[in-house]
Amino acid sequence: MKKRVISFVLVALLSVAVMAGCAAPSPVESSKAPEASSAAPVESSAAPVESSEAPVESSEAPVVDGEKTIGLVIWGTTGAAALQEIDLLNRASKITGVKVEVLASGYNADAQLKDIENFAAKGVDGIMICNCSEEVVAKLADICDENGIYFGQFHRNLTKTDIKDRVYSSKYFVGNTCEDEQGTSYILGKTIAEMGIKNVAITTGPHGDSTAEGRYAGLKKAFDEAGVKVLAEQWDVSTGETAATAAQNFISSNKDLELIATMFSVEAIKAANTAINNSGKKGKIKLAAQDTTGDAAFDLELLSSGEAIMAGGHLVDPIFTYMLLCNAINGTPLSDKPVECRLTQIVFTPERAEVYFKQMEQGNTLLGYGDEDFKKMFKKTNPSVTADDLVKMAAAFSVEDFLARNKK
Amino acid sequence: MTIIAVAVLTGLINGVLFTVFKIPSFILTMSILFMYRGLTIVACSGGTIPIPLWMDVLDTLEVKLAVLLVVLLVFNYIYTFTKFGLYCRSIGSGEVAAKYAGVPVSKVKIMAFVISGLLAGITACIMLVRNGGVSTRFATFLETDILTALVLGGMPLTGGSGARMKSVIIGAFMIMALKNGLLLVGASDKILQLLMGVLFLIAVAISFDRKNVAVIK
């Protein structure tokens, strides 16, 4: 009798789940509805013109302001960087009315593909992704084309020609935002060399990840030119745990080690710093990073004491892709071709660190851009905005730009 | 083809090690899994090995359904209507009795591992095409999903004549419907893992045949 009762409960639970799945709105109807209702000018973009034919069938579908959604596929939701970026997008969504939903099943292809499929099934209007590999973006393009969903990348671009051709040919691809990883890491490498450091170890992300590859390439180039020796390196270090293990191994195996460069993952910075402190090498082994930890006091202390050389401030990156998507979803795309926004990372000097960590980043809030800036990026609140304006805003991002925009 | 060949060879190795050295199959296969994970990490050098973009044409519902149907039909026939299938069920129900009844237990077990390897290879091909490449995190914890699906579908953990092909189908569809349904109603993916674990525990507790297991460790 007991077994039957439990079996009945299980069946009921599973039936509810199956009914919920069947009752979910069709992704095709929900993503085409906004296009049906928007007054998209013919000359502005290919996408609104083509899709305006199909919505004749679904034009009765009501479009309610604030019900549009962008799915965010991100590496995690517990680290400082992710929390800051999600907070930034949530603040922007109050201006645009386009909600952000987050899925972060893991930083690997299978998990990201599942997140994308789940978003498509949920009927989101747009998807923005920080992809773990470029192949995932090719799959994303297939799914978005099938379901009529706009998509874009943040913190990433496409370097493989065949994948880039495939993705750029999609009428739903709005573009990407990324940083000049190689350029910034080259500057970092030069700075390290100028400090007289001769023996370093490097951790970076997975092979195939454009950020990891770019950062490594720039750093290695600078080191090769300056005669700095790379004693050890480890790839695919994307969590605090793997960073701690790597740092401990570097320290125990290399007596001449002077610096550990953690070139991927925010969690890796604190983990490596802890490993240095625990081994009694505080002050003897320095740290370099191309991210900030999200703990402003910690970062400021490391920078001002000379224990670390850092670049960062690029956590505002997603806002540009978000705005490209919002404008496209609302039927007022900024361009009929994919837009590439390029952000410059801040290489921290003591003066810049003082402004950045006290005024531009506070807890989980990124203040690099505020409500007035969001209004300038969104066509509904600023009808004259163009794709070029967005590109220029991204390129201009710096401590000096922030101070100029927030002059009181 | 290379994937299938390696998978079949792995199944053969598993089967031989199991029958010759009498290592419990769960421990043996987990050890081989860890070994292959290590090899993957070395081969991938901490990154992804992509496949050519043209292979995308294989990542369609039609291809996957066709493969699924062929596999189900072929192996259901083998399991239900052939001597080999009968031998498998009899070994599952009682190995000692089967041996005394003249069933070539070792050969059947090795063949079962080879078939398992073949099916794993087919699955790997489908997943490879879906993901666009292989990485160090390829198919991590997939084994737990498979176990949960089998148990939910009513497959007896001890095997034997109670094992049915339909359990596999029912279990697989149930787990996917449950996962997707819960996500669509807004359940967090972290709560999903917790729920799947609880479900697995309940399903095992209900379905485990305590009477026919001599010692429950």
Image: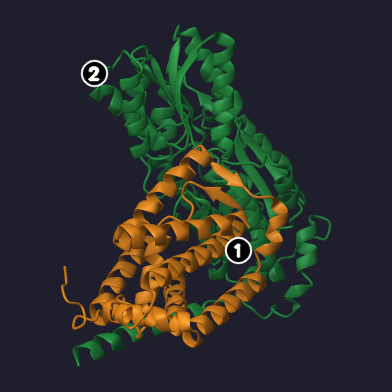
Chain colours: A green, B orange
Please tell me how crowded label 1 is: few (under 14), some (14-19), or many (20+) other residues with Cα within 10 Å: many
Residue A217 or residue B28, whichever sits in front = B28
- Locate residue B25: give its quadrant: bottom left
Q: Amino acid at mark 2?
A: Gly
* Residue A310 location (% of width, % of height): 45, 23
Same chain letter for marks 2 and 1: yes
Dot 2: chain letter:
A
Residue type, numbered disc 1: Asp
Helix, strand or loop for disc 2: loop
Q: Quadrant of the C terminus of chain B?
A: bottom left
Query: Which residue is the site of mark 1?
Result: A125
Q: What residue is shown with label 2?
A: A280
Relative side of A71 to A281, left or right: right
Q: Residues within 10 Å of mark 2 (few under 14, many from 20)?
A: few
Q: Report the front residue among A247 and A328.
A: A247
Q: Confirm whether residue A154 shows in the render.
A: yes
Q: Which quadrant, please, contains the N terminus of chain B?
A: bottom right
Residue A23 visible here: no
Give the residue at x 83% y 60%: A42
Q: Is A154 displayed left or right of A231 in the figure?
A: right
Q: Chain of mark 1?
A: A
Q: Nearer the viewer, mark 2 or mark 1?
A: 2
The residue sitting at 38% across, 82% down in the picture is B89
Asked whether the residues under the numbered discs 2 and 1 touch, taking CB atoms below 8 Å apart as contact, a structural biologist would say: no
Q: CA distance from mark 2 to mark 1?
A: 52 Å
Residue A137 location in percent, x, y? Answer: 63, 52
For mark 1, give the secondary structure. Answer: loop
Task: Give residue A332's position: percent from left, percent from top.
Answer: 71, 57
